[in-house]
Image: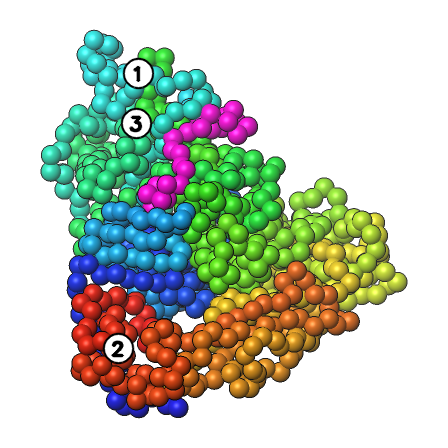
């Protein structure tokens, strides 16, 4: 039955009522999931939760979405291992950025305003309600779970699950979750580069700078911000964390440039170390000028005296209240504005330096509401949760691998300096560590959930359980977006399965993350890592022709890749021969770096036992940095050209040819099939469209052929009567790992209560049934129908004149739908004065 016009106008009236209630400072906002923090990971968490059918409230501490990613960090911190580990919604963000610049793929350098526009679009398209300029005041707990949080506006946010996506971990603290800050001793977790580090790896001051106010005179006292000595020996613990700064967006385009004036309250003494560094020989690297589009920069710290506000007191930010943090942020801004002005204008700076750096100013078309200055301070580190699993240096280096991966990190273990000290009579920076990781590494699900005994309904994708030095790698913005999406997926499953976040089924979580295109392991698939033959390997690779090693385009395996220089003459070939442990079926994957100058018709030869040769052609302009399946083939054991090899050639091609790596993944005799629900709740409205539940059926490799998967339908709901009839089978086309299956309730006017549908995989000779063999979804009445069932007798429910949406059984002038929305009693005259705001009123009123 279609809703009539009167019903639609009533619904519109209720929407207006919700908007009026929105002006009330004491609103109660109830959703499935509440996300605290509107930075990049908070946005991906909110969008993922909404896409999985949950109601969401996104509480944003300032008045902008995106945090650092829209606050000046436009030169993305990817690392030296390519960008293939950045998948799922994180890659979606960068691909949307690319679209803004007319590109077909991901773009990792961008202007702040473009990033913010993308975040706004993602939130808008997901219909996520956003609450700006709200910071946490208090948190209420009951039975080991958060029940509600209250913000500075007086708004109360209630939810089934909360996600702390703040840079500071404020919610986890108020929830009573264990955390730490500062630097652990190396001995605590068996690390080598944690704790105090006086032998820095970079960003050091020149030799010869006196630490005293009057050079050479200790009696004059230390310069501001200089400590006499570290708190202990190298590798020992202290309370300090790495320095913060703003990632300034600058421009040298005169028409769009506003020069930075001398800051109010400028004090020349604050820049004494800068003057002395210049006198000691520093002539450049006062800030980075990494280019982003349209003549702008992402300007970060670049030397021992640069953007970082190294005071040795950064840790004071962690426990500060909101107002104090505002003042601390202003102090950072004043330092950096003063730095730029000093380098460009101060007479103690040589004229040649002033001239060389005088071209940079603030872009007039960025940060229009903040004097063209970034709205987000770079909080590199604050609280770090202490949970049952702590990410350490060993995870980053690959010597320990988390079995419950929810995403991957790959950036250098990077700690900026933490303090300035006196060393051998000179001022020196302390704390800088920059150690590369050998490749992408798994991040544990257990590291983003608290101990079960502390909080059962909180996930923490930023201030996760990690040591200081491991966090120096994990903390990058692409990874924050990855973990935000994974956290939201887990939150949805915790709600659907009515379990604590610690008890979420990892196989189910993993299946959904893979279905959403996330990367969980270095293999790039849900199988094992397989056997990889890389172009740089000492054995197993045979080259003919003039190949050139390169690393200019990201996404390669190992240290580099090979290209043929675009000769297109058939002179080059690269044969990859694996050493296989056993004969059998192996799925073959090829990897390359994509670029518009690549060939779209690269010939690939797969040589098999018995002289069998299979030929394929690949398009190397797309799918860069991924393992692309060529199919499954039967190989012999051991290592021989005829027993199994893959050769890339440049015969008859139309562009450059790349030879990077080949992966051989031993397939099972049969694909393994699983079923699970990404949204286990279907809503049955009394009018209008139903809200379906969504299930997924996924298979493991091989994907070479189409596969028909059969299932049975059980439960107390009737197929074709309570929900649209299902066929009992789905077809997964060749090359496709998963397909969606919807359970769509049929519309009726009955308040029937919750019914369930059970989808169970049937056995079949063409596949094996995996661990996720059955899933139950619920068909529930809408909140209005649930409300009716709680207030009317079974006889009254059958009488629409009494229990219908527009009936007014107590004759007080307020019909049942309004009574429901306002919290009134339909059988007692009068309307309750307190209203609840449903951020997604359509769901609440369907």
For this orientation, the residue located farthest to the right is 610
Q: Percent x, y for residue 215?
A: 23, 14
On the rendered structure, is 578 left or right of 54? right
How far is disc 2 from disc 1 in space, using C-alphas? 73 Å
At x 17%, y 35%, the residue is: 345
Instruction: Say which label, 1 or 3, has the lower sequence index.
Output: 1
Residue at the spot x=84%, y=65% of the render?
A: 612
Predominant SS along the magenta part? loop
| Label 1 residue SS | loop
Q: Determine crowd level at label 2: few under 14, some 14-19, many 20+ residues with C-alpha closer than 10 A.
A: many
Mark 3 or 2, which is nearer the eye? 2
Q: Residue 168, position in %: x, y?
A: 33, 42
Residue 337 visible: no
User: Residue 732, which numbered label?
Assistant: none
Residue 270, horizontal then vertical, whole percent: 19, 28
* SS for dot 3: loop
The residues colored magenta run: 171-195
SS at circle 2: loop
Residue nearer the viewer, 453 or 218: 453
Checking the image for residue 228, the label placed there is 1
Which dot marks residue 826? 2
Using a 10 Å C-alpha cutoff, classify the residue at mark 1 as few (fewer than 14 neighbours), some (14 to 19) or many (20 or more). Answer: some
Q: Earlier in the sequence, mark 3 or mark 2?
A: 3
Q: CA distance from mark 3 to mark 2?
A: 62 Å
Residue nearest the observer in this picture, 200 or 162: 162
Q: CA distance from mark 1 to mark 3?
A: 11 Å
**Measured from the top left, where is residue 276 in percent x and y?**
25, 22
- Mark 3 lies on residue: 312
């Amino acid at each position: 039955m279609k809703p009539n016009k009167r019903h639609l106008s009533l619904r519109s009236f209720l929407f207006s009522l919700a908007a009026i209630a929105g002006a009330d400072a004491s609103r109660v906002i109830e959703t499935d999931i509440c996300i605290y923090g509107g930075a990049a990971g908070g946005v991906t968490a909110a969008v993922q939760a909404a896409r999985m059918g949950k109601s969401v409230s996104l509480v944003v501490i300032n008045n902008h979405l995106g945090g650092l990613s829209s606050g000046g960090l436009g030169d993305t911190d990817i690392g030296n291992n390519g960008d293939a580990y950045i998948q799922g919604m994180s890659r979606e963000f960068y691909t949307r950025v690319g679209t803004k610049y007319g590109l077909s793929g991901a773009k990792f350098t961008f202007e702040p305003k473009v990033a913010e526009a993308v975040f706004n679009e993602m939130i808008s398209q997901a219909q996520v309600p956003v609450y700006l300029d709200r910071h946490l005041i208090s948190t209420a707990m009951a039975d080991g779970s958060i029940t509600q949080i209250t913000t500075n506006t007086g708004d109360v946010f209630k939810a089934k699950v909360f996600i702390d996506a703040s840079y500071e971990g404020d919610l986890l603290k108020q929830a009573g979750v264990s955390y730490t800050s500062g630097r652990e001793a190396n001995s605590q977790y068996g690390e080598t580069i944690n704790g105090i580090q006086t032998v820095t790896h970079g960003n050091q001051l020149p030799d010869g700078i006196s630490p005293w106010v009057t050079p050479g005179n200790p009696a004059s006292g230390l310069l501001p911000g200089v400590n006499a000595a570290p708190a202990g020996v190298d590798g020992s613990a202290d309370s300090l964390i790495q320095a913060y700064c703003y990632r300034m967006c600058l421009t040298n385009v005169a028409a769009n440039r506003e020069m930075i004036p001398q800051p109010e309250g400028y004090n020349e003494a604050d820049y004494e170390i800068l003057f002395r560094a210049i006198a000691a020989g520093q002539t450049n690297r006062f800030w980075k000028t990494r280019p982003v589009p349209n003549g702008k920069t992402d300007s970060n710290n670049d030397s021992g005296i640069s953007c970082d506000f190294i005071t040795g007191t950064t840790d004071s930010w962690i426990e500060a209240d909101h107002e104090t943090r505002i003042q601390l942020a202003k102090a950072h801004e004043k330092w950096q504005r003063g730095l730029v002005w000093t380098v460009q204008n101060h007479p103690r700076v040589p004229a040649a330096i002033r001239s060389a750096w005088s071209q940079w100013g603030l872009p007039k078309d960025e940060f229009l509401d903040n004097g063209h200055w970034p709205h987000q301070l770079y909080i590199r580190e604050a609280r770090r949760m202490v949970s049952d699993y702590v990410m350490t240096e060993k995870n980053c280096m690959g010597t320990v691998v988390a079995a419950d991966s929810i995403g991957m990190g790959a950036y250098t273990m990077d700690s900026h300096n933490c303090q300035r000290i006196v060393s051998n009579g000179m001022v020196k920076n302390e704390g800088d560590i920059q150690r590369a990781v050998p490749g992408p590494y798994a991040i544990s699900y257990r590291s983003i959930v608290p101990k079960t005994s502390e909080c059962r309904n909180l996930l923490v994708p930023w201030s996760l359980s990690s040591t200081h030095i491991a966090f120096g790698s994990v903390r990058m913005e692409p990874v924050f977006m990855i973990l935000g999406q994974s956290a939201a997926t887990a939150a949805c499953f915790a709600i659907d399965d009515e379990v604590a976040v610690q008890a979420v089924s990892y196989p189910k979580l993993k299946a959904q993350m893979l279905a959403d295109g996330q990367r969980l392991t270095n293999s790039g698939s849900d199988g094992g890592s397989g056997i990889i033959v890389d172009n740089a390997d000492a054995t197993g690779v045979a080259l003919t022709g003039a190949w050139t090693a390169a690393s200019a385009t990201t996404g390669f395996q190992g240290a580099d890749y090979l290209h043929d220089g675009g000769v297109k003459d058939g002179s080059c070939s690269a044969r990859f021969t694996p050493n296989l442990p056993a004969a059998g079926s192996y799925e073959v994957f090829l990897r390359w770096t994509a670029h518009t100058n690549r060939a779209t018709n690269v010939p690939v030869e797969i040589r098999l036992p018995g002289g069998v040769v299979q030929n394929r052609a690949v398009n190397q302009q797309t799918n860069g940095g991924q393992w692309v399946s060529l199919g499954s083939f039967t190989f012999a054991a051991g290592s021989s050209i005829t027993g199994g090899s893959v050769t890339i050639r440049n015969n008859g091609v139309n562009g450059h040819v790349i030879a990077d790596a080949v992966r051989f993944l031993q397939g099972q005799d049969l694909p393994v099939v699983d079923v699970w629900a990404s949204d286990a709740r279907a809503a049955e409205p009394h009018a209008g469209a139903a809200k379906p539940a969504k299930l997924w059926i996924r298979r493991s490799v091989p994907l070479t052929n189409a596969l028909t998967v059969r299932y049975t339908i059980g439960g107390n709901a009737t197929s074709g009567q309570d929900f649209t009839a299902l066929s009992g089978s789905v077809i997964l086309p060749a090359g496709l790992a998963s397909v969606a299956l919807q359970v769509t309730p049929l519309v009726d006017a009955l308040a029937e209560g919750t019914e369930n549908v059970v989808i169970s995989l049937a056995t079949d000779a063409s596949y094996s049934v995996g661990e996720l063999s059955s899933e139950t979804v619920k068909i529930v009445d809408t909140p209005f129908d649930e409300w009716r069932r709680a207030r009317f007798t079974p006889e009254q429910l059958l009488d629409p004149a009494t229990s219908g949406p527009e009936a007014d059984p107590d004759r007080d002038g307020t019909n049942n739908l309004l009574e429901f929305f306002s919290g009134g009693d339909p059988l007692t005259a009068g309307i309750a004065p307190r209203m609840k705001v449903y951020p997604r009123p359509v769901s609440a009123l369907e």
